[in-house]
Image (spheres, rainbow, N blue to C red):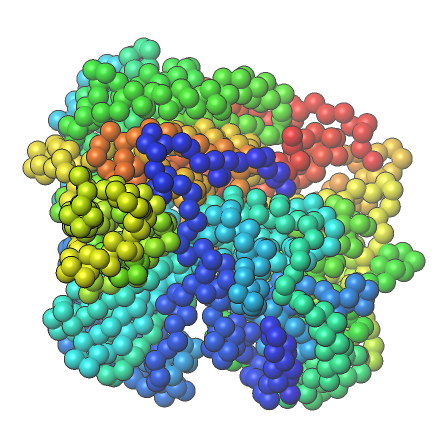
Amino acid sequence: MRRLTQINHLDAQPSDIEFSVVGKSHKHESADKQVSGKALFVDDYPTPSNCLHAAVIVSNIAKGKIESTDFTQVESSSGVIKLITVDDIPGLNDIGPIFKGDPLLSDGTIKYHQQPIALVLARSHRQAWQAASKAKLTYQSETPNLSFEQAQQQPHLLPKNQFGASVDLDSLIESAVVVKGELEVGGQEHFYLEGQISLAQTTEDGGIFIRCSSQHPTEVQTLVAEVLDISFNKVTVDMRRMGGGFGGKESQAAQWACLASLGAHLTKGSVKLRLPRKIDMSATGKRHPFFNSYHIGANKHGVIEKAHIEVNGLCGHSADLSGAIVDRAMFHSDNAYSLGDASIVGNRLRTDTVSHTAFRGFGGPQGMITIERAIQDLSIKTGQDAYSLRLKNLYREGRSTTPYGMEVDQCDMLLEVMQNLEKSSDYTNRRAEIKQWNNSNLVLKKGLALSPVKFGIAFTATHLNQAGALVHVYTDGSVQVSHGGTEMGQGLHTKVAQIVAQTFGIPLDLVHVSSTRTDKVPNTSPTAASSGTDLNGMAAHNAAIAIKNRLLEFAKEHYNLDAEPIIVNGRFETKDQPVDWTHLVQQAYLKRISLSSSGFYKTPKIWFDIDKSVGRPFFYFSIGASCSEVTVDTLTGEMQVDRVDILHDVGNSLNPAIDIGQIEGAFIQGMGWVTNEELVWNKDGVLLSNSPMNYKIPSIGDYPKQMNITLMDKANPEHSIYRSKAVGEPPFMHAISLWCAIYDAVASISQHREIPNLQVPATGENILQACLAQFDAIGYTRDEAEVDNETIG
Amino acid sequence: MLEIMINEEVIEIEYAAPSTMLLSYLRDQLGLTGSKEGCASGDCGACTVIMIDLHAHSGLRFSQINACITPLNALHAKHIVTVEHLNKNGALHPVQQLVVDKHGSQCGFCTPGIIMSLYALSKRQGNTDKPEDFLAGNLCRCTGYGPLIDAAKEIAGVQYYDPTLADEAAVTAWLSSCNAQTTHNYLKPTNRKQLAEARRAMPKASFIAGGTDLALEITQQLSDIEQIIDISQVDDLLSITELDHGWRIGAAVPLNQVHTFMREHFPSTDELISRLGSLTIRNRATLGGSLGHASPIGDIAPLLISLNGEIEVDDGETKRRHAPHEYITGYRQTLLEKQQWISGVYIPRLGKNQRHAIYKVSKRFEDDIATVVMAFNFRFDTQSRIESCSIAGGGIAAKSTRLSELEAHMLGKPFTQALVREVKALAALHIHPLSDVRGSANYRVSLVQNLIQRFYFECNNIPTRLSDHA
Ligand SMILES: Cc1cc2nc3c(=O)[nH]c(=O)nc-3n(C[C@H](O)[C@H](O)[C@H](O)COP(=O)(O)OP(=O)(O)OC[C@H]3O[C@@H](n4cnc5c(N)ncnc54)[C@H](O)[C@@H]3O)c2cc1C
Ligand code: FES
Ligand code: FES
């Protein structure tokens, strides 16, 4: 069992500016309710009387046509009230979020295994799912395309695109050092602890009121309206909290909300649809598997001069968000390195599986790990330590432009983060110790890697970078905030409450953030791309500023002040005595000053020219570095994480405890992605890893034996909300250093002479294969092991 | 009639279908929605609650269990505590406050289950060397576990004032005064005779012990099991007794108790048992259940085979013993006859010149089904030759097997690297595993070979194990 040493979870890092509310480690706004079981998730709300429960009848094949359907046993199953098929849909059957191609219910064509075909409504959840399993369907089945090789032969889902002028591969060969390789990058199941769920109720106007677990209430609203053929203003979505989202409820919560709404609409009542875990795992999209290749030329010192990188996302049956996801993989194929003359190509391939979707990092991790693998290869080719190669190749003065034409402004920060971490993690000494360890251990081999993360912040679809908020001040001084962002555990509502309290100059407990509702703040963007706080925090701030300006102007006049007062901790000074906030609010109310305002924000500076593939797609970069040490068992491929050090830049932290929580949680989730979380489909397109029994996310025993997380304490040079930086996704990619450490451990078998064939995830099986190949390459057999037989018995 | 104390209230249930699980009863019938459903298969821990019963020696016993796979009918005369109860007076329980202070909840969906596991930890008397074990059955996708590990370490061994259980005496009195369970379709005999009668009365009923396997038929395959005989209270199945040559362990002794016993007498099995499911699972799971479903990837059968154990089956009249590799006849098939049940297992003492090891390789270290299990039990003579040996494997065939070809090849020979090489080659010829979601056939063959190598290295004191390196 792993023993742990101290970790500095709660070390509040000092900020550049003194704030009274932001910058402090306030507890999560729902923490007390969560620990006492009082925080309500959709399934916890009392159901309306006569609420029906829905289940979906799903396809047993991955590709083909439905030949015949026989639902008699479904309909006669106990508790069943109604069966709904595609023909019952009043409006559109296609719920594709950007591009078309996502049928709500199959129209006869089957595009993936477990595709919904019909909806059953019954008196109870169990009855509905029992009935659904009784459908008798026959199919004309076709062989599904599943692999990269098969998918390559098919027309792509979306057009290919490229950053940078094509690099002449012939001239690349002339470089002093050339590395060329391919990397298979696996997908990942979200495994949010709360599965997909929606509760829909019809309203007296023939509309729908929906509680659902969704990162994108506006999209749910619009799609439900389109499916039911009613206007958007008749649909209201209420989203209080999700039990985890991670991208899996960005576009793919909509299907279940639409189905529940369809059921409610057709029965003029209420319907709840909750997916059992296995259905959730097999019927919803995952992180995209990628198949990438890299071809890199460096000078004899290991400085990269030329690169050609191709990223191929396996998208599943439809486009969903794949356009932007492959874009983001391309945007991060350089990670933090200047590649010189570089061309980066992205392809979006169709496979006959669920449609893969957003997942923390949104393609970024799959792009980033490819260049990090290339650097590891380069280290083997040049005989230099991978860390020193990384330092050499960082974006730096004179080489600070990305392949898509954006300047990296914080090159100095990149270097500083790396060097600080090198010191604090004691990298150099540990490197020497590990070398010694590996020389004297037959079976257990250690590896170490220190790598950077540079992650672009903003939606790459420029129009999504907007947000709205609504702030009300009531006459007891309390404040209610609504904004377009959704709370999925990341602490968004806590941070927004802190921002509003800070902006007004009042104590945090006066501010309440309500559930996210489409009737309070309309036309919102999904809570995604790490931008939740950047966008919604700024919108709420703007709303608060509008009210505050009215109040200050009023105060100056009303209390006869020389200048507008400064409110601190809910009070301000006048000539006679201090006035408190509530008093000010009440006086203002009596003088008919509006105490409510909406706020709006759009991210400045960003643009992108799609035709030329250049621009500034990101407002800024989030920066960090991590150092991981692992031990690998070369007999079994088992692996253990010995130590992890992370140094991460969140600008001025709005809430250090929440930020550290995001970093730690993201790292462990990333660790799952690069190690044990393996998606396995059989040749018929059936997902075999379809339950927590056979798909293993990290559990408590996988936590590193030692973990140190530190925030880099530097204000964001851009005018972000209180000069903070986004934190949701970037730290996920710190797990790449862990993967590189496994690579390093395996390569130590050949004294770092042979490139190990390590893939993502590096499962025990993959690690063992790679170890055996290393042993083969150096001609080692265990028989050479000198052991003393006297000790037995 | 069924009587359960849930939080403060004693609830009398006239009838509950055998397939009703505690979780749906709490959530749907009682409106206690604090306990969550994350999987309904015992894997995530979001449904964790505390079961309190009376233990002969130590008084009130607190065990964390998975409400999603515990039949309501199994809980007669037990006290169930759910998360709602911990702050019944409005103030947070010290364990809840600690998780808040550590910033241990993000989305909060796993949190009630985490709280209950930590509450169970806080009820453990004295020191626990691995407090995190109490959370091994609780998945959290958000926090990364750091703050929860901190919380567990802080809770371990500390005596908290527990506002929840104000009146222990009253609970004890109630627990010891409950009438016998009278439910039809769910029989709970307490001795051999009653069990045999129950079997005759309901020949089609399923046996249930801990239910950690059987319940999945109900929650995953959605079958409505109509009749159940619960063997968990049958006295003959509940004790561990010392005999001349070893021990008899009752088939229904919960694995956590078996673990304590085995750790003391067979320390080589400690790691395996601590990785069998999670503590939450082991609080309910039994040896009889594992041998009852006879899954080829179960951990218990290879363990028993390698320890030269025996399985005792009973029909109320006659007890018979079988060697485990003979008892298991095929894929989930055994010699057990309809009127029989498993009553216990026998394990002989290990001799001085005997060396036992059992290795499990799984994708995830904890709470995962094995890709391969290999177990070795070698006795050496005075010249360090292999006098007798048993080699058992799981995950490499349709049933847990004894690798007698390998054994035969090794007998009488000194245990050398040369012999290891021969046996590794032989293994490749004799085992024909399947490829599945946990690993390919090739991987499994390599594992079998390399675990033989590992055993050899360990016999020679060459460090091979991740868990004990510095
Ligand atoms: C989350 C989870 C993790 C698990 N991890 C592991 C693991 O790591 N390794 C492992 O080996 N197993 C694992 N299991 C499987 C299972 O928990 C164990 O095999 C356990 O020992 C079963 O015991 P039980 O008492 O709960 O069985 P039950 O579910 O009560 O019974 C199982 C079967 O045996 C029959 N049966 C039970 N007792 C008897 C008896 N005395 N006589 C005759 N028949 C009987 C029942 O009718 C049923 O068919 C896991 C299960 C879960 C849910
Ligand atoms: S709901 Fe997952 S263990 Fe019970
Ligand atoms: S806090 Fe979200 S799963 Fe644990």
Q: With respect to residue B241, does A168 lie above or below?
A: above
Check the image and report above or below for B9 versus A286: below
Q: Residue furthest top?
A: A300
Q: Position of residue A92 (x, y in %)?
A: 14, 69
The total of numbered circles placed on residues is: 0
Determine the residue positioned at 68% across, 50% down: B158
Q: Residue at x 70, y 23 (%)?
A: A786
Residue that extends furthest to the left in the rendered view of this protein:
A611
The residue at 47%/76% (across/down) is B31
Q: Identify the image quadrant of the N terminus of chain A.
A: top right
Quadrant of the rendered structure where residue A80 is? bottom left
For residue A569, what is the image quadrant?
Answer: top left
Can you tell which quarter of the image residue A469 is in?
A: bottom left
Q: Residue A30 appears at what percent x and percent y?
A: 41, 57
The image position of residue B377, as x and y in percent, is 76, 46
Q: Is residue B386 left or right of residue A698?
A: right
Question: Is there any visible trace of residue A146 in the rendered image?
Answer: no
A206 or B208, which is in the foreground? A206
Instruction: Name the foreground residue: A716 vs B417.
Output: A716
A621 relative to A441 in the view: left or right? left
Question: Does residue A556 show up?
Answer: yes
Say which of B402 and A541 sits in front. A541
Which percent across, then down, holds residue B270? 71, 48
**Relative side of A239 to A705, left or right:** left
Residue at the right extreme, as displayed = B244
Residue drawn at (55%, 79%), measured in percent from left and top? B19
